[in-house]
Image (cartoon, rainbow, N blue to C red):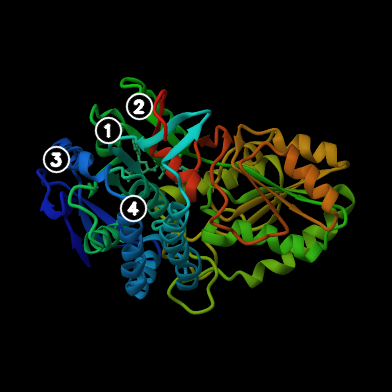
Amino acid sequence: MRNQVKHFINGEWIESTGSETIDVVNPATEEVMGKISSGTNEDLNKAVAAAKAVLPTFSNSTKEERIQWLHNIVEGYKKRKDEFIEVMTDELGAPLSVSEEVHYNMGLGHFSHAAEALESFSFSENRGGHTVLKETIGVSGLITPWNFPTNQTSTKIASAIAAGSPVVLKPASKTPFAAMMLAEIIDEAGVPKGAFNLVNGTGSEIGDGISSHRDIDFVSFTGSGSVGEKIMQNAAQTIKKVALELGGKSPLIVLDDANVEEAAKSAVSHMMTNTGQVCSAATRILVPTSMKTQFEEAVQKVLPSFPVGDPRKEGIATGPLVSEDQWDTVQSYIEKGEKEATLLVGGTGKPEGLEKGYFAKPTVFTDVSNDMVIAQEEIFGPVTTILTYDSLDQALEIANDTIYGLAGYVIGKNPEKFRDVASRIKAGRITVNDTATDFHGPFGGYKQSGIGREWGDFGIEEYLEVKSVHGMPS
Ligand code: NDP
């Protein structure tokens, strides 16, 4: 049982000014695995004051110093690999292999790629004889979700350090322990006191406090659209810049020359990886009408190769949903789907033998039309939808008929069609034939999937202001 009822402020772990705590529940066992403080506004004010105090020196640190801090963090992070994997498996319910291959690796990738991006990053440019300077934006507030405990925190922290912006982080209270490990690593890496602060607590108190705080100059948030909206409203009071990474309902277009088995494997992998709790997952699978039956058979065949179960057990591909709330939400979408579409596999309730833990049945709906609720709203569970199309134009029309625009996927053989799809899907990231994620590309969405970009040099830019200096040679 982890009892970590402290906040990390100004380089120290300090007691909360309040006495309330939040239970952190292991979603596979439904047991309380630890406690954190439910921070107060007073705690937040202390953290913001520490960040503000270090701003003049931290923002003037050299590129070399920042690169060294990032390298030190990478070394510290690697040393605690086994602990990270265990912690994320327990707090999130990710199978051990997923904690390692996805979660651990993504956190590591962000720190090392921020260091790499910084090497060639220029904070001063000559434009037409004048100088353009890129300066630290000020104090940044970071609010992160539970679905990728190290990925979402690391991308924001790494970019902020690279830009010289002191931060106050509020991690998700469902998965706070990996973030608290990061605080220890950042401290040991020699990052100046006050440049990294972590305050635990509820979204309604600490998250709300960050987005409306007068001494916070920029907020970077990842999470639901409804909270993103509140953050923008709060930030408007002080004309604060916001970066929002919100939801998605991404399409996967299976071209008519695609290998059906490969396409089915891709669709199933999207719905099962991280128990479908992935903002960029493809959850609308568009197949040519002529391929529908074959595709449905292939999906049913491939599903058992993603076994659901105890995330600590060898060979398990998919764990439970993160919480009871999330389980209830997913169940209500499955109920809606059963009314409006055809259930191909799965349904409501828990999988056989997995009555304890927030496990959901992998569920596939077919005969789905794009105006159905299950095709329009983010479900965030092991659920997918199969839609059909008769021409590529129609597929693209369906793909873009959504409020979201985070990602798009295409599977097939014809490079001309890849170009067509990539240029016509309105989304921030397009992936052809399941090509592996590359940290050199930015991450972020069009439309209601968000504002701004993360990762590498695009991420660093978010934490900077631009100053135009006329009459001074660079
Ligand atoms: P939230 O958006 O509520 O949570 C994300 C973060 O925001 C958490 O740290 C949360 O705090 C915080 N927060 C909550 N309320 C506020 C507020 N008023 N002001 C500032 N911060 C706040 O996501 P949920 O956990 O409720 O998940 C609901 C749905 O959101 C999911 O089903 C999914 O559709 C979507 N989602 C999308 C994600 C993405 O990657 N884009 C990630 C997670 C969820 P606290 O710790 O108290 O929860």
Contact? badges 3 and 4 (CB < 8 Å): no
Q: Earlier in the sequence, mark 1 or mark 3?
A: 3
Q: Tell me: 160 left or right of 315.
A: left
Q: Earlier in the sequence, mark 4 or mark 2?
A: 4
In this orientation, does residue 432 appear?
yes
Q: Is residue 176 above or below residue 96?
A: above
Mark 4–mark 2 Cα distance, whole angstroms, equals 27 Å
Mark 2–mark 1 Cα distance, whole angstroms, equals 8 Å
Label number found at residue 216? 1
Mark 3–mark 4 Cα distance, whole angstroms, equals 23 Å
- Mark 4 packing: few (<14 Cα in 10 Å), some, or many (20+)? many
Residue 112 picture location, percent across and down: 43, 61
Q: Which residue is mark 4?
A: 174
Residue 39 picture location, percent across and down: 19, 44
Label number found at residue 240? 2
User: Who's the residue at 20% across and 53% down the image?
Assistant: 192
Label number found at residue 46? 3
Q: Amino acid at mark 2?
A: Lys
Q: How many numbered dots are placed on residues in this image?
A: 4
Mark 1–mark 3 Cα distance, whole angstroms, equals 12 Å
Q: Earlier in the sequence, mark 4 or mark 1?
A: 4
